[in-house]
Structures are given as C-alpha cells and as structure tokens.
Image (cartoon, helix red, strand yellow):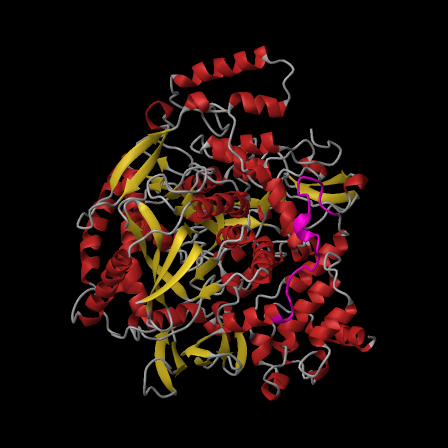
Amino acid sequence: MKVIYTDSLVIGGGLAGLRVAIASMQRGFDTIVLSLIPAKRSHSAAAQGGMQASLGACIKGDGDDEDVHFGDTVKGSDWGCDQDVARMFVNTSPKAIRQLAAWGVPWSRVRGGDRDVIINGEKVTITEKEEAHGLITSRDFGGTKKWRTCFTSDGTGHTMLYAMDNKAIQMGIPVHERKEAIALIHEDGVCYGAIVRDLITGELIAYVAKATTIATGGYGRLYSVSTNAVISEGIGNAIALETGIATLGNMEAVQFHPTAIVPVGILTTEGCRGDGGLLLDKDGYRFMPDYEPDKKELASRDVVSRRMTEHMRKGKGVPSRYGDHLWLDITLLGRKHIEKNLREVKEICEYFLGIDPVEEYIPVRPTQHYSMGGIRTKATGESPTLKGLFSAGEAACWDMHGFNRLGGNSVAETVVAGMIVGEFVADYCDENSLNVSTSTIEHFMKQEEKKITDLLVRDFGENPFQLKAEMQKIMMDKVGIFRNGEDLEQAVEELKVLNQRAKKIALRNRISSSNPELVEAIRVPKMIKLAQCVAYGAMLRTESRGAHAREDYLERNDKDWLKRTLTTWKDDSSDLPEVTYEDLDIMKMEMPPGSRGYGVDNTIHHPDTPKREQEIEEIKQANPGADRYEMHDLLNPTPIPEKFKGRNERIGRGFK
Amino acid sequence: MSDQERVLKFQIFRYNPQNKGDKPRMVTYEVTEAPGMTIFIALNEIRETQDPSIQFDFVCRAGICGSCAMVVNGQPTLACRTLTSTYEDGEIKLLPLPGFELIGDLSVNTGKFMRAMSERVESWIHDNYADEVNFERLEERMDPDVADEIYELERCVECGACVSACATKRMRPDFLSAVGFMRLARFALDPRDKRTDEEFYEIMGDDDGVFGCMTLLGCEDYCPKDLPHQTQIAYLRRKMALI
C-alpha cells in the first residue's frame, strides 16, 4: 500500500485550492495539492469579467465600501446567505485584490480624465479623478449598486490563476497532477486525507493528512449544457457526501447565466452587459426594460435568466435548429472597446460562431453556470460534522451566495475563502496531531480497490457514458431555470432508477491504468447521487428563492423556508439522501430580510423580521455616535482572522 | 456552413505506453458531421460510441485553458475550437503534440514541462517586499498602459503549440522555447519585478536561451493567442546583447 503523509492536503488546484495551500505553506506546514490537470488549466481560468472588491477608485465606484458590497451580496442571495460569512468576505476582498496586485496580476487601472462609456444604450462621458490615476479600476456588473468589478480585460480568472500558481511555484508547493481523489479516509468523525487514483498508471495511493481541503469547484456538468469546464463534475462534493457524515448545503441552488452562446454553452461574460451591451429579441427589440425598468439588463443573474426565458416563452425568441435563443448586442460598444476589454468574447465568437461581435449580434440563452450549493462548512471552512475536512470556493457551501451569486463574487470568493479558510486550516494543523490507525487507511484502500476490480471483471452491464447522458438530460429538462412539483417528482423517480443502474456498470475497455471509461465509471455513480441531492432538495423546497424558481410556489417564503437544506447520504443502499434543515437566525442578521426590488414583492415574511428591524432601530438610536465599524460590531460581530481584520483604505476617504 | 451531412474520416494516432506490448499506429474512425462540430465534439463522440479507450485532454473546451493542443493535419492548434468544417475533404489526421512526454494517444504531459519552465525562468514577481505589503493600504499605482501591455504578454495559455512548432527545440532538447521567452518578456516589462538585466541574462543568455533561437518563428505562426513572439524574442535579444 502506497501511503504519502502530509500536514495539509488540498484537493483541487484552482484559485481556492492554491490559496489555501499557500496559507498552509506560509505557516510552515507540509502541503500537497492534488489536481486532475495542470493547476493553470483549472476552471478558475475561465472566469472572464472580474472580481468584486469595494476599492471605489473608479468614479462610478465612488462611495463604495464593505457595507454597500455586503448589502448587494445579501440581497443578491435573496437573504439565503450566511451573513457572518458575507461580512468576512466583503471586509477581506479589498485585501485579497491588493495582495494579488503585489503577486503580479496586471489589474486594469484608472486613467485620469474623460472617457466615453455606454450606459443604458447611450454614450456618456465620465471623468475619472486625476488623483485615482494608476489605481485599480472597476466595471459595472449585474445586481450591484456601484461599479465594483475589478478586471484584466476579460481574462481576469486567467491572470489571477497564473499569479496564484506562480506564487505557489515560487514557494515550492508540490502539485501532484493527474490525480483524482475518489474517497475520503475518516475515522470516528475525523477526516484524515483521501484515497487517490493516479490517472496515468491507475495506481491507488493513500494521501494521509491532518487537514484535508476540498476545492474542486462546482457540479455544473450534472447538466447537459453548462458553461463549466468538462472537469466540473462535483466529484469533490460527492466524496464528502459518500462519507455519510459530511453534509452538503443547498444543493438545489444552481445558477443559470443569462448569456452563454448557442448551442455549445460557452460563456460570454456579464462584462458584455456591464460595459453597455443589450439583450434583444427576434424583432431586434430591447425587452429587459419592460420587465425590470430599474436595473434592466443588469438585474441579478437569476432575474435576467428568468425574464429571458419568459420572453422566449411568449414567442419572442429567435428560432434556430437548436431551439430558441435571444441576441446579445455589443456592437454599440465599438471595435476599440471590444478588442481591448472583451477580446476573449471576440475570439470565442469568431471561432465557435464564425461571427464578428463588433458587427453582428451574439446568439445567447440562459445556461447552467454556477453551483451555490456544496460542502456545508462553518465560517472557518470546516465541515460542522466531519472534523478536519475543510472546503473552499465553489465546492463549498461556506454560504456567502445563498440562492444566487452575484457576478464577480465567485473568483472573489475563491481567493478570499482561500485566505480565511487557509488560516483556519493552518490553525487546525497547529492544534492537532495525526492520529489515525493504519487499519483504517487499509480499509478505505481495500474498499476502493474492490470497487475498481468489480468494474474490471463484470462482463455485461450498463454503459457509463449513456447513464451520464440520461442523468444530464433529466437535470436539464426537469431541474432547470423554472421548476415545478410534477417535473421534480419525475426527476427524483428517474434518478432513483439511474442510481440502481449505476451499480451495474460494465466496461468495454477493461484495463486499470489510464482508461477514460474507467474514470467515467468511477465518477458517474457519484454524479447521480449529487444530481439526486439537487433534484430532491428542489422538490422539497416549496418556495421560490433566488435561482430556485418554482412555478407552483411563486413567493419567497421566509416564514417556512428561511433555512438551509442539508443533505447526507448515510445509507449506501438507499436511492435518496437524508434531508434536514438549518434555520437562518434573523435575530442575528445585520440586514434582516427585505425586498430585492425586482418585479412584484410577494414575500411571505417571518415574524422575526419586524422584531429584528425594530431591534436594529433601537440599537441605532441608542448609539447615535457610532461609526459604521462600531455599528457593525453592535449588530453582528464576526470572527475574521487577526491578519485580515484591519480597515481598508480608499482614495479620498482614507480608512473611514 | 452546409447542412448536408457528410462523413468525416479521422485518422488518429494510438499508443498507450501503459499497455505492455502496445505499438504506435494510426487508426481510422468515421463520424457523421454535425453543424458547428468541433474536434472536441467529434473526439468525445468517438470515445462514447466507438472506442472508450481513446485518450485526449480537454478542460474548458472554449480555447481558454490550453489543454487540448494537438497536431491537426500537420499543424499544432487548439482542438477544442477547431471546427471540422474547416477541412474541405473531410479528412482529419490527429497526432499528439511533439516535444512533450506522451501520456497516451493524443494526451501529452504539458503540465510537467510548463512547471519546469516556470521554475527555470522563476516565473514570479521578484520583490523582497512583496510579502510584506500592507494590503490594507492603497495598492501601488501602475501606469494604465503598462498594465495593459503586461496583460498582452500574459495571455499565453501554456498550450505548447509554440514548443512543438519550434525547430530549434528539436535540435536543442533544453531550449527554453517561445513560451519561456514570452514569460520572461512579461516579467521584464513588469515594474513590480525588481530583477536586473544581468539577472535575466543568467536565465536566458546562452544557446539554450534567447541566443539559440534560429528565428524560424514557428512560434509566431502557430500561437493560438497570436502573441507577439517575434517582437519579444528580438526585444529580449537586444536587451541581453547590451549586457
């Protein structure tokens, strides 16, 4: 049995994983990163538009600060997020971006003086402050009060990931590439690493560690059309689920991005609309102002995706052989702007659609994009039920996104969670010694060996590629943008059948070393379980909140549903997860539930909401001299690691 | 694009070094073309319906991550964004990228090569104070044009097309190649990197570095991101010659 020992094992080499690894290494702990692929190819690289941090240097970001960012994030989440975490996040994000600037990200900078921009379809001249010249600039994104999204052209994820991986290389952090974690090792409620398969040799290796961090990204590939990379299959989530101890949070919270190209589902950034692009229907008519007169194309993602779908259902979509779509018009931005700030979008249009977006409209449709759900963690990033297991980034339900993530908050989460969770991981490594019996390691190793041997000897059975395609179709057709009880019940029943069939996979290519069919055979049963968590959670949640939109329960129901869905899979022979709920405590909220300001507000309020509002009012009146920092401490103090506690400086405002 | 269905003929290099006794060979597969079909879509269809053992690497499938460079009808390129309709006779020959360790079939170990390259050129900001930056304070200012210029050179996706298209690399196994030069040019341009020209000379001032380049410029011809390799190699040479 091959065993590799380390202090901090990080599964996933994207932005979040690398940042956790850097934190562990900085604190002097032996650290190993496992990755399916070379780290610089991780899906983080595909983030185009930018990272939200309230630097407020750009004139349209003037007046921005942590509090405004907090408000946008909580509203965006439809009050489903953990406000402690959102608060930690907004306070740390400016630091994260400045650290990345020191590590080499060439953030686009403010140029003092006049410049022309497109706002609401009109050319407008704005004047940047001369004193802000050379500071990090920002662009507009959906669902935000200020221009807060910092960027490098539309290759932001790429430059962030390159800077982060370069830092990791500088520190000598080993990245074990082409390795897949297929099971967690745990004993008495404590996690001690993972059983890992070498994707080239097929060898199984036990990586035994004090702390294990899962940072494997989202589960978008449960759907047949997704903007996600093909590796975003949720396997990190699944191995946590298969412990029967770790819980997954809000798996039904799945985001659809308004503008992926048709038919392949590749993303065009929200920056297209942030920079002034418009959505048009088959008549060339700009329809969003009819639905959302205030934010128009820049309403929150879930809202825009639903409005687009509604509009297509009215027969206003552009028919094509791949079904209806709408147009994204960025021609009004002009060649110079597109070739500088939207060049990846331009390349994608040229190569995949054969069009020049400077001259022509882009065919787009809402497409699966982001997984708000994931491994449930405490604010420290540790699983509340499985000690020593941490998670960060999209893989986690740290829960700053609730039921809808704002554009620009995902890459921001990866690095901020990496910093914060990284410190808690290091604390854990500091406080705990590795105390696991070799028989436990052997038990998990044998279990995985047996599963693989079974697959290799079975003569007849199911085709893993086919099972996956069937699962993806169910999710696409029945657990999509608009959901209803009937479809969801069918999805759950169909997934139960698939779950049984997945126990009988047989291979055509029966070798244990590098074998894509075997990889699929290992992953697909895990993916079906995750899909069931999504479908079943969606079926049970009889309300509409953020990206979870029920046609049969239109209202957000705080009275009965202001709670987080927790899923575990304790019984391996079962076809359904166990579902419990965790209440969100309004009485601790800095910002009690209110209206997001989209469409008709038909929220069913919780009795605690007026109570908490009154309490907040009283606290405010009792402390008339309190500044915003003191007020935040009075309303809901949050545990930010000492390193990141300080106030953030802004141009023209200092540390106020 | 024609709506007429045609049958594409893929000739694909097959060899799995993990399989004892396996021999390199070309195997032909036929696929019915679909509108908008890319090599990514076609290869997956072959794997799912004809031969589940075939190895290749795709991640983003959007031309962003650099995983899928291979030799398509004699030319190194990103397979994910190559439309099958580009090839009029419907015959497509796929070979793994030369110059890298073969993992199997069309999959090569660019990751190992690129990590070694990054270590060799010390692909990070050299500034003793970078870790002591007080990130509560305003960030150091940077000229907006300089930031944009750095981004231009940082668009490299480490796909390896330049390495496989480089004749010098064939002759000199340790040749740094265009990907390394581009990375050095990127850091040499960056005011945050405090390395001196002499320090850069130590890294690239020999025949395996910028002076070894025969200026055949396959890198310039085949870079899928159209990076300015020719200009940057010339710039680095001049800079190094002045040392």
Of the pair A2 and A644, the residue shown nearer to us? A2
Residue A591 magenta-highlighted:
no
Can residue A73 be seen from the camera position used here? no
Q: Is residue A587 above or below residue B72?
A: above
Residue A22 lies, in percent from the top left, at 54, 53
Q: Is residue A607 above or below residue A152?
A: above
Of the pair B228 and B174, the residue shown nearer to us? B174
* Residue range corresponding to the magenta coloring: B120-140
Please state if A474 lies on the left or on the right of A26 as rendered.
Answer: left
Can residue A226 be seen from the camera position used here? yes
Residue B131 magenta-highlighted:
yes
Please state if A582 lies on the left or on the right of A503 as rendered.
Answer: right
Q: Is residue A379 above or below residue A619?
A: below
Q: Residue at x 45, y 26 (%)?
A: A600
- Single out the residue that lies furthest toward the right: B242
Q: Which secondary structure is most common in the magenta stretch?
A: loop
Residue A526 lies, in percent from the top left, at 29, 55
Q: Residue A112 lies in what quarter of the image?
A: top right
Q: How many marks?
A: 0
Of the pair B62 and A554, the residue shown nearer to us? B62
Of the pair A39 and A226, the residue shown nearer to us? A39
Please state if B46 lies on the left or on the right of A364 as rendered.
Answer: left
Residue B127 lies, in percent from the top left, at 71, 57
Residue A651 lies, in percent from the top left, at 74, 36
Please state if A119 lies on the left or on the right of A554 as rendered.
Answer: right
